Amino acid sequence: MSRGCWVVILWLGLLLSPLAIPLLNVIPAAGDPDVIYVPDDYSTIQSAINYAEENDTIVVRAGTYKEHIDILSKKRLTIVGEEGAEATIIDGIGWYEVIRIFNSEEITLEGFTITNASDGIYVRDGNSTTIEDCIIRDNGDDGIHIGWSEEVVIRRCDIVNNTDDGLYLWSVFDALIEDVNSSDNYKNGFYLRDSRDLSISYCQAYNNNDDGFHLWGISNASMVGCVAYLNDDDGIQVFSSNNILISGCEGYHNLYGFSVSDSYDIWLLGVEGYNNSQDGLSIGGSDRICISNSQFAENDDDGLYSSASRIYISLDLPRKL
């Protein structure tokens, strides 16, 4: 047998020996996701994002990071504060956006305090963006500003003391907003405009200088179990919208508890508007408004005021408007 054949046999024997098998297991396959640690692997979050590839996870250790973060043309990237929002702070040092997501897909932000810039989080063309367990506070414009995006998820966030709106959505299609508190913002707690297919559940809006929830140009949305109180204007305002279900929500200690104008096919089921400075529910310039199992009591003006074309009030939900 030639020397070449002996070399091949020897190489195969070493490769398949028990000593070689563990070495084979630790060699990563091309394209496997990485876990990147900041500041262990990279000193800044931005440098970690620049290095990261599709499906990677960036874990940020506790601390304060003074930087602006751009997530541009990335896919399937998760960025997590290791010890949660109270311990992991991103400080935008007073200008620009703290985090900007542009032309990206499936970006997840979880467990950060985001503060001290213009917008806290700015998203445009960011389909399947998820923001969870974050505190967005003390920014010069909106806490969260999202536009031209689809399949957005915002869960378990506190949005506090921003100079413009707490959460601003425009041209967003298919969004889930769940267990979000928006308070002490200089304009609206939630400003949702020109969007469709929204699910808003168990959110609170309070101590905002305009409305708690402001829906303008919204089509196909549900609000379930939401509470609006101590806002300077309306608790929940629906304007120029259609096919909106508001169920199990409360509006109290606002100017108006609920306000509906220039809208149609609006359902208010099991809602309560009480102790407001003017009406519990005010309806104007609207059509096909259904109110069922709802109460509007102890308001300084009217419990229910309506100039709608058609309004249906019942204890039992009608089959059809």
Image (spheres, helix red, strand yellow):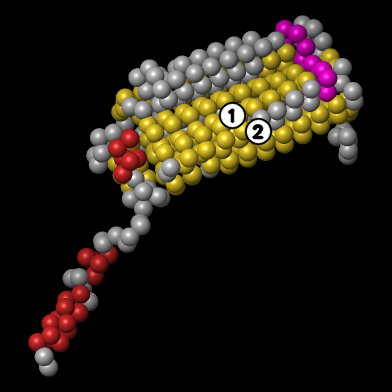
Element at label 2:
loop
Crowding around mark 2 (Cα neighbors within 10 Å: few <14, some 14 to 19, many 20+) is: many
The quadrant where residue 282 appears: top right
Q: Residue 305: percent from the left, percent from the top?
A: 84, 14
Q: Residue furthest bottom?
A: 1
Q: Which residue is mark 1?
A: 169
Position above or below: 41 against 140: below
Task: Of the two numbered discs 1 and 2 on the same chain, state the one appearing first in sequence.
Answer: 1
Disc 2 designates what residue? Answer: 195
| SS of the residue under disc 1 | strand
What stretch of residues is rendered in magenta? 271-286
- Name the residue type under label 1: Leu
Picture residue at 59% right of the left edge, 20% below the top: 189
Q: Residue at x 44, y 20 (%)?
A: 118
Would you say the residues marked 1 and 2 are in contact, meaning their CB atoms lie under 8 Å apart?
yes
* Quarter of the image with the C terminus in it: top right
Spot occupied by residue 9 in the image (x, y as percentages of width and height): 17, 84
Three-letter code for the amino acid on which mark 2 is drawn: Ser
Q: Is residue 85 left or right of residue 270?
A: left
Where residue 243 sits, quadrant-wise, is top right
| Residue 306 disc label | none
130 sits to left or right of 93: right
Tell me if residue 224 can be seen.
no
On the image, the x and y values in percent for residue 178 come to 59, 34
Residue 174 picture quarter: top right
Tell whether position 71 is magenta.
Answer: no
Q: Please give left or right for residue 199 compared with residue 278 in the image.
A: left
Q: Decide whether residue 279 is among the magenta residues.
A: yes
Compared to residue 19, the image places residue 203 above or below, namely above
Give the residue furthest to the left.
3
Residue 42 percent across, percent down from the top left: 26, 39
